[in-house]
Image (spheres, helix red, strand yellow):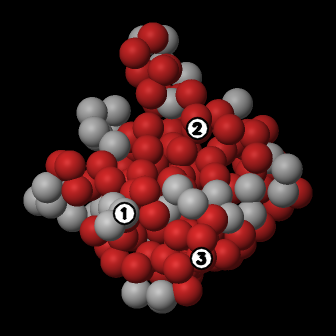
Amino acid sequence: MLSFSELSATEEGLNQIVTFQKYVPFLVKYIEESEANENALTLAHKCLINISTSQEGASAILNSKEDLILHLLNKICDTDYKFLDYCCYILSNLATFNGILKQKDFTSDETLQDKLLKCFLSSEQETRDKYKFLALYFATISGYPDRRRYVYLLV
């Protein structure tokens, strides 16, 4: 039997996960659990990374929680957050689909903008390495005209 992360790594598996409408909301809710098992959280994040690579998967993720993007952005502002790089991957993948524009993001919160910019432009190499995939998120988001001006304001 395949594990959930192995199942999400195949096209057929992704289709099964997205078709069964309870999996994706469960995974999204699970990654919010601070008391959850670390190995299980790692697998949940990896599954969401895989799921977020397809249009159907990204839509399912974005539709599972109203403020998901804000949640992920706020999580990654904590430079000690263990799953920071996974959240950056998920954000980067989701940004490639215009469904992301239905969610609130850094454009709706100036304090969050400041926090993200501070993390993203850190002079510490270790911190900069953690945020390398956030650059992909910003680059992709800047392709949407209504988000472009905010990205330019950030940098």
Residue 134, disc: 2
Amino acid tagged 2: Leu
Residue 136 x %, y %? 68, 38
Residue at 63 percent across and 53 percent down: it is: 93
> Mark 1 packing: few (<14 Cα in 10 Å), some, or many (20+)?
few
CA–CA distance in space, label 1 to label 2: 31 Å
Which numbered mark, 1 or 2, is in the foreground of this view?
A: 1
Residue 115 x %, y %? 46, 39
> Mark 3 packing: few (<14 Cα in 10 Å), some, or many (20+)?
some
Amino acid tagged 1: Leu
Question: Which of the marked residues, 2 or 3, is nearer the chain's N terminus?
Answer: 3
Q: Quadrant of the C terminus?
A: top right
Q: Is residue 130 above or below residue 102?
A: above
Residue that carries the numbered disc 3 in the rendered image:
15
Q: Secondary structure at mark 2?
A: helix
Residue 2 x %, y %? 36, 63
